[in-house]
Amino acid sequence: MSLIKSISGIRGTIGGSASEGLNPINIVNFTAAFATQARKNSPVQSNKIVVGRDARMSGDMIQRIVIGTLQAVGFDVVNIGLATTPTTEFAVTEEGADAGIIITASHNPKHWNALKLLNHEGTFLSDAEGREVYRMADAEDFTFAEVDHLGHVEHKDYTDAHVQMVLSLPEVDAAAIREAGLTVCADTINSVGGIALPRLFDALGVKSAYLLHGEPTGDFAHNPEPLPQNLVELGQLVKEKKADVGFSVDPDVDRLAIFCEDGTPFGEEYTLVSIADYLLSLYPGSDTVSNLSSTRALRDVTISHGGTYTPAAVGEVNVVTKMKEVGALIGGEGNGGVIYPKAHYGRDALVGIALFLTMMAKRFLKPTQIKALLPQYAMVKKRQDLTGLDVERIFDDIKRAYKDQSITTIDGVKIDFPDRWVHLRKSNTEPIMRIYAEAPTEAEADAIAEEVISHFAPHETNLDAYK
């Protein structure tokens, strides 16, 4: 059983002994430590923490433990129940809370769950803040409140408020969407997308919406990561219903994958690029940010609109930090994560859907036509089990081998060639190394990835390529 502590929160498998995975004992310790840190660091001092969760089968159990622990530390809790990650982020600032906790393991399979930790701005903790929480949890450096000072619980539903916030964005045009008479399909993977997306579609004036796996049971109908091989049914449904577009979200609805009207994948790397192209056409000269593992197409689009592109280390908090530093109009990650600061500083699939539908309606274009207008690259994504690997030795070997190329080391090792790149880094969410490569064609991207992987020798490799 696994437990991973990273900038993405505390993530682990459910079940096993008291020393394994994410269990009631360490959930109490992590929650109490986080609440103690929030009381010390938050400038708001509202004595309030927001808690939301996705629909995972372990979610209700974990939420009860988290809320009880927060009460025991003396915090009042706003329990927003089944809610998306961006809804919870939005609720933190709307409530004027000191912090927030999202109970979700994002794209991981159903036997995983996690605590994602938010500060008073509704954004993820920095690496230093996270490390301090983990130290306090390990040392049990916290105290519990006396009986007269236990916290109270208030129940609220923030989904409708989140939807209305999305509609209030000046770049979202519900009237244009309604006039276009769009038909959409969506796969919400038996989680909270099944609650949020129908409300969004209705508010935007979508003509018809067909939902796959819409019941939020947490018993995922397929691998929950929104990758093409997991979304065959969605592509078929788009063709069957003659829909204008298909959308897929992960269990906590911060990642967005799009399907074209012909049932083919739009490409998760191009979710952010297409929406950025739309916004940059409205605000030329603006800047953008994405992580080092994201497509060069965002850089190209940004430059074409007179702006400046800046890369960041992988991890939402790193992207957000860089976006604030450069004043970016939009940013995000190539996994379908769109961050639009006018909404809030967090990946938000609802914002992405609303902007994409507006673009379709106002430009009178189908997804295949939108994609054809963007810079075209091909990417391959591979992974390597870290067991037995001397990662730092491998990184050193690769840096020596490619010393004549442009090398970035802020997050693993990225090698930039004139017309392609390859990036190797340890995952924040799984005990693996990720190897991403991009080039003009898939064959060329695969070739450069395999060339770099050859430096793993004499270690045995067990690579799994996916798109």
Image (cartoon, helix red, strand yellow):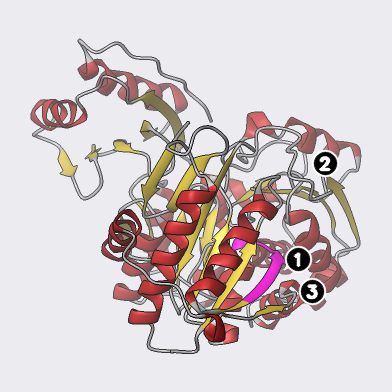
In the image, residue 138 sits, relative to residue 345, either above or below, namely above
Residue 160, x across and y down, in percent: 77, 75
Q: Earlier in the sequence, mark 1 or mark 2?
A: 2
Q: Earlier in the sequence, mark 2 or mark 3?
A: 3
The three-letter code of the residue at mark 1 reads Ala
User: Label 2 neighbourhood size at 10 Å, few (<14), some (14-19), many (20+)?
Assistant: many
Residue at 56% across, 74% down: 71
Residue 5 appears left or right of 63: left
Element assignment for label 3: helix
Element assignment for label 2: helix
Task: Give the Cα separation between the discs numbered 2 and 3.
Answer: 22 Å
394 or 305: which is nearer to us? 394
Element assignment for label 1: helix
Task: Give the Cα separation between the discs numbered 1 and 2.
Answer: 18 Å
Task: Give the Cα separation between the discs numbered 1 and 3.
Answer: 6 Å
User: Which label lies toward us, 2 or 3?
Assistant: 2
Magenta-span inclusion, residue 84: yes
The three-letter code of the residue at mark 3 reads Ala
Residue 165, x across and y down, in percent: 67, 80
On the image, numbered disc 3 is attached to which residue?
176
On the image, numbered disc 2 is attached to which residue?
238
Q: Earlier in the sequence, mark 1 or mark 3?
A: 3
User: Label 3 neighbourhood size at 10 Å, few (<14), some (14-19), many (20+)?
Assistant: some
Magenta-span inclusion, residue 381: no
Q: Disc 1, disc 3: CB below 8 Å?
A: yes
Residue 162, x across and y down, in percent: 69, 75
Quarter of the rendering containing residue 91 = bottom right
Residue at 73% across, 50% down: 191
